[in-house]
Image (cartoon, rainbow, N blue to C red):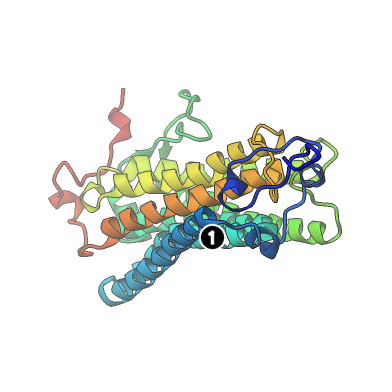
Amino acid sequence: MDGKGTETAPTGANMSNRSFPISDPICQTGEAPFAMDVIHRFGVFDYILYGILTFMATVSLLVFLEECIYIYKKVPANKKNLIVWVNGAAPAIGTMSCLGMWFPRSTMFTDMFSGCYFAIVVFKFLILMVEEVGGDEAFLKRAGKYKLKISTGPCCCCCCCLPDVAITRRSLFLLKLGSFQFAVLKTVFTIFSIVLYTHGNYDIKKISADGDAIWINSFVGVLTITGLWPVGITFIHLKNTLRTIKIIPKYAMYQLLLILTQLQTAIINILGSNGTIACSPPFPSSIRGYMMSQQLLIMEMFIITMVTRLLYRRQYDPLPEEQDANENTRMTDLTQSP
């Protein structure tokens, strides 16, 4: 309080721990502050927090670069590009989150980049599973006598009446197409959103039915579900075949990336937009939610980077032929499922 009984703005460590009444001018504007406005309010705690998070993002990026060197030296040519893309998901998202943390007005663009990268990773992960079997021809040769179970999540997990589908060149193409359309259309809609934003028509905080953002994001949500569906179908079919190369924990890391970058971020942003997360100058409620999301993602992506490094750093020997394979490396026979 000052001499007139009014509350003064905090500086330093209190910047991230104090809530302000809605009458505060910064809380009413709802606009993200400039980077220098944030830095000018830093205290010891803020310097330590931002320093540690920046260090974690930097280490994640350096670990990824070191892993790229290993991959290009040790991994067969047909898998190099795929593994680099999949391995780079966590470091790329962590780096973008770090930029969004330091430059609050860029968070929409950094989130868009992270979303586009993850959409590409969805497609690359599906192709990687097929390549781990030996490629398209080897996959079709191994899987010719089996069928694909399509009543899986996230699209049709409740549709148990759906018939199993024969594994043919056409069905494999449709699986790839399902994930590929997500990678392409997600990028297209991101560019379209940026164009609308430059003309003042795209406001991510405007969630009413007459806003462009709600319709674009809803359509992208449908694309996301249809893009993830083929990956789930392929994983269920190949999880026994690829068990020796730790496909289950790899798929778990991929799913964790999805949950953290999409679901967690959406929940925090919604809480910020409706005022559940209190305003704390220089951050209005919605922007403070974005900042919390960015900071959490940096820590989470750091951990995922270290785990994926252990999972993908191995000898890449070819799988045994189907007739020579043991029970742990055979295809999942869904025709005998109850």
Q: Nearer the viewer, residue 199 or 122?
A: 199
Q: Could you tell whether 155 is left or right of 87 in the image?
A: right
User: Is residue 176 in view from this perspective?
Assistant: no
* Quarter that holds the C terminus: top left
In percent of the image, x 45 and y 62: which residue is there?
Answer: 57
Q: Could you tell whether 208 is left or right of 156 in the image?
A: right
Residue 260 x/y as whole percent: 49, 44
Instruction: Identify whether 42 is placed above or below 291.
Output: below
User: Is residue 159 in view from this perspective?
Assistant: yes
Residue 242 x/y as whole percent: 26, 49
Name the amino acid, label 1. Answer: Cys
In percent of the image, x 51 and y 57: which residue is there?
Answer: 44
Query: Residue tagged by mark 1?
Result: 98
Q: Could you tell whether 315 is left or right of 91 in the image?
A: left
In percent of the image, x 59 and y 52: which residue is there?
Answer: 182
Residue 301 x/y as whole percent: 43, 53
Quarter-of-image position of residue 90: bottom left
Furthest residue toward front: 3
Residue 120 x/y as whole percent: 52, 58
Q: Nearer the viewer, residue 306 or 167?
A: 306
Disc 1, SS: helix
Quarter-of-image position of residue 5: top right
